[in-house]
Image (cartoon, rainbow, N blue to C red):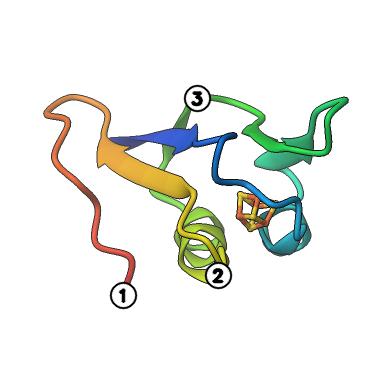
């Protein structure tokens, strides 16, 4: 199974938690908003941890095939 990763840039405050937690999977854009490096990833705990660590819950993970939300805990 793979996950689809989205960052709501309207919510992102640029705290950098996700970039620090999963630097291979998240990077800042020119506006200091985080973006997923790849929209679809494998099931990676670092990606889940990054989503769970976001202070404004800007990161969503869904099953890439079904669209079902991925639990963050
Ligand atoms: S943890 Fe959340 S607020 Fe911080 S950079 Fe990542 S998406 Fe933005």
Which sits in the foreground, 47 or 55? Answer: 55
Secondary structure of the residue carrying tag 1 is loop
Image side of residue 41 versus residue 62, left or right: right
Q: Which mark is residue 39?
A: 3
Q: Which residue is mark 1?
A: 73
x, y (%) of residue 50?
A: 56, 61
Q: Nearer the viewer, mark 3 or mark 2?
A: 2
As drawn, the residue found furthest toward the right would be: 30
Mark earlier in primary sequence (3, 2): 3
Image side of residue 2 versus residue 19, left or right: left
Mark 1, Cα crowd under 10 Å, few <14 / some 14-19 / many 20+, is few
Q: Which residue is mark 2?
A: 53
Find out if the beta carbon at label 2 lies less than 8 Å from the nearest ligand 1 atom: yes
Secondary structure of the residue carrying tag 2 is helix
Q: Is residue 42 above or below residue 15?
A: above
Which sits in the foreground, 35 or 2? Answer: 35
The residue drawn where x is 56% and y is 63% is 54
x, y (%) of residue 16?
A: 77, 57
For the N terminus, the image quarter is top left
Mark 3, Cα crowd under 10 Å, few <14 / some 14-19 / many 20+, is some
Q: CA distance from mark 2 to mark 1?
A: 10 Å
The residue drawn where x is 47% and y is 48% is 59
Quadrant housing residue 71:
bottom left
């Amino acid at each position: 199974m793979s996950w689809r990763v989205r960052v709501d840039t309207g919510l992102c405050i640029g705290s950098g938690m996700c970039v620090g937690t999963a630097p291979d999977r998240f990077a800042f854009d020119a506006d200091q908003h985080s973006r997923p490096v790849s929209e679809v990833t494998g099931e990676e705990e670092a990606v889940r941890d990054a989503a769970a660590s976001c202070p404004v819950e800007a990161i969503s993970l869904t099953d890439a095939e079904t669209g079902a939300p991925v639990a963050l805990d």
